Image (cartoon, rainbow, N blue to C red):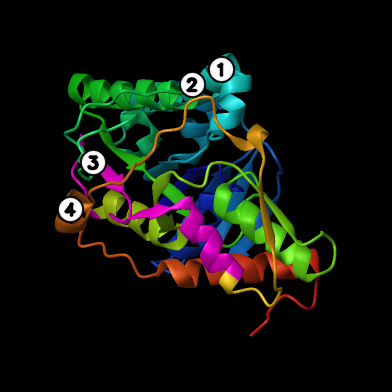
Amino acid sequence: MRILITGLSGFAGKHLIEYLALQGDHTFFGVDLKKCSTGTDIGGSQLVENMTDLTDAAAVRKLIKQVKPDHIYHLAAQSSVKLSWEDPLGTFRTNVFSGINLLESMRAAASGIKILMVCTAEEYGEVTNGSAITESDSIYPENPYAVSKAAMDFISTMYHKAYGLDIMVTRSFNHIGPGQSEGFVCSDFARQVALIEAGKQDPVISVGNLDSSRDFLDVRDVARAYWHIMNRGRPGEVYNVCSGKPVKVSTLLEILISLSEQEDIEIILDKEKFRPIDIPTIVGDNTRLMTTTGWQPQYSLEDSLSDILDWWREKVNPGKGDKN
């Protein structure tokens, strides 16, 4: 099978290709602007990377014509909520134009390509009824990133209905796991703990809002969910990819500190880390994903946080990363 993954070098992309390589003998094509190399071997499968600007319609048409993919996992995006407030126009251009170009190229190819369009739970906005969010709940995006993804969500459904394209959409909740950049809350906390343990930061952790609750799912379970949706999901449907459990941000910090050998870590609030609009609680309902595809999460929150901390320990102090 020929599989195209956009955003290959991103957090989810790296874990996705590792999982897909275990599922069969595939040829992988990765699209990313950060690097370009060919001939990399992934567990016996071939990986060919390509530097293509997905906002360039002609370049995307050429890419699809050359690659002739069976499956496309569209992960590439500007995914930082903070950056989306700073550059809403660039966020919209990256997230919407790229997706439309892929769908138009699929339509032109007329070759039975399947695509998984990865969108976000940020689309739902604030849900005040206290219940877990289902795919049938209304969406009300409250930041530029969420607006851009909601647009792509609607466009994908429209293209499925209008042209019969084999499209499935995810509304993915918070990913966590080893390899995540420091701009995300779990990784940011773990990095600071690792720096403190290595003597490279005073025993003080700078934090934003600790009172919000989110639905956190290990990125390795996310990768498995994407495979399950692609291969067992129903075209035209939207799937929440989530744990189904709300966790306060303060709980993440408490667990990470409990995993540290450093005593007496001080916590200070940094107002610059607060969002202009911060929804108190977001938790998803993953019933459709589990009943339709048979997917089940495998990683506990504690296991995920331990792996994240060990990853940062190795990164900030090579050779001494594993405290176990």
User: Which residue position is annotated with label 2?
Assistant: 144
Q: Is residue 56 above or below residue 204?
A: above
Using the numbered discs, state the Cα–Cα distance from disc 4 to disc 3 in whole angstroms: 10 Å
Q: Which residue reaches farthest right?
A: 200
- Name which of mark 4 and mark 2 comes first in the sequence: 2
Q: The disc labelled 1 sits on which kind of residue?
A: Pro
- Which stretch appears magenta? 232-257
Using the numbered discs, state the Cα–Cα distance from disc 1 to disc 3 in whole angstroms: 26 Å
User: Which residue position is annotated with label 4?
Assistant: 287
User: Which residue position is annotated with label 1?
Assistant: 88
The part of the image, by quadrant, that contains residue 1 is bottom left
C-beta proximity under 8 Å, tags 1 and 2: yes
Q: Which mark is residue 133?
A: 3
Kindly identify the residue that appears in the image at 18 percent across and 23 percent down: 161
- Name which of mark 4 and mark 3 comes first in the sequence: 3
Q: Is residue 8 left or right of residue 68?
A: right
